[in-house]
Amino acid sequence: MAVSQRGIKKEILALLAQAELEAVLAALARYQPEKLLNPLFSGICSGSEKTKWNAVSAMGVTVARLANQDMEAARIVMRRFMWSLNDESGGIGWGTPEALAECLACHAGLAEEYTKILVSFMREDGFYLELPALQRGLMWGIGRLAQVRPELLRTWQAPRHLLPYLASEDHIVRALAARALGLLGASEAGPAIAGLLPETASFPLYTDGRLSPVSAASLGREALAALSTSP
């Protein structure tokens, strides 16, 4: 007997909460991507860090699969992300900047169309995100995309729009902005990043499918080291 959509959602949320990423992706590959979207949207806004980050990674892979089958269907997902970050949506959009960026990292076609939108969330003359918690997600997302498509971010002047975030009142926003600027080779950010080195606060950073504790100072040092080797 076919499993209902509600049953699928229950199964997937349990999987996101309990399994490691490799097992999550292997299990989700058995489903049609459109069947996974609603469970993954629930997952990215979960209060559980494991569930959230598994869902973010899975969303990127799933939407990339969808785009390969039906680009317009993938664009609808992108518009859903954008709507969830709009004040008029009535929601907060937890996990959305991260998931949107992961989709762009996973699919070149979507990145060509929507990187400018991701960058616009940094801009006060764009779709600016005011909440520091959302800015943390945005800074992570810019850094994630910078690992894969730095030239595209430079095309849309991401380094220039990142620089003000080095002066954020939120230490995680500052640290993640420094990381992104290092990945983008933004040498003009060097002095401001150096000013972050005395910071000792630590927080979990999601990279390569796992959460690991990092400090603002360590990310600042990594960014400066990256800048020192940039052409």
Image (cartoon, rainbow, N blue to C red):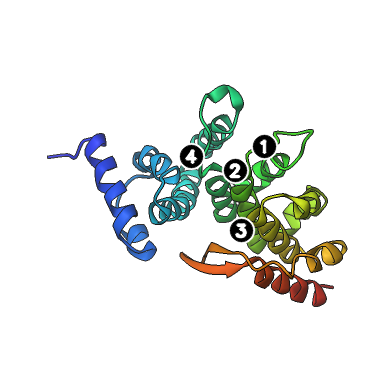
Q: How crowded is mark 1: few (under 14 residues within 10 Å), some or many (20 or more)?
A: few
Using the image, determine if residue 54 lies above or below residue 211: above
Amino acid found under the numbered disc labelled 1: Glu
Q: Is mark 2 on a helix, strand or loop?
A: helix
Q: Seen in the image, is 10 located left or right of residue 51?
A: left
Disc 2 designates what residue? 134
Q: Do the residues labelled 1 and 4 touch (CB within 8 Å)?
A: no
Quadrant in the picture for the N terminus = top left
Q: Residue at x 48, y 39 (%)?
A: 70
Amino acid found under the numbered disc labelled 3: Arg
Distance (Cα) linking label 1 and label 4: 33 Å
Query: In the image, which is nearer the foreground, mark 3 or mark 2?
Result: 2
Disc 3 designates what residue? 144
Closer to the camera in the image, 10 or 165: 165
Q: Residue at x 87, y 62 (%)?
A: 188
Residue 130, numbered circle: 1
Quadrant in the picture for the C terminus = bottom right
Query: In the image, which is nearer the foreground, mark 1 or mark 3?
Result: 1
Distance (Cα) linking label 3 and label 4: 24 Å
Amino acid found under the numbered disc labelled 2: Leu
Q: Residue at x 60, y 43 (%)?
A: 134
Labels 4 and 2: the sequence-earlier one: 4
Residue 70, numbered circle: 4
Using the image, determine if residue 227 lies above or below residue 93: below
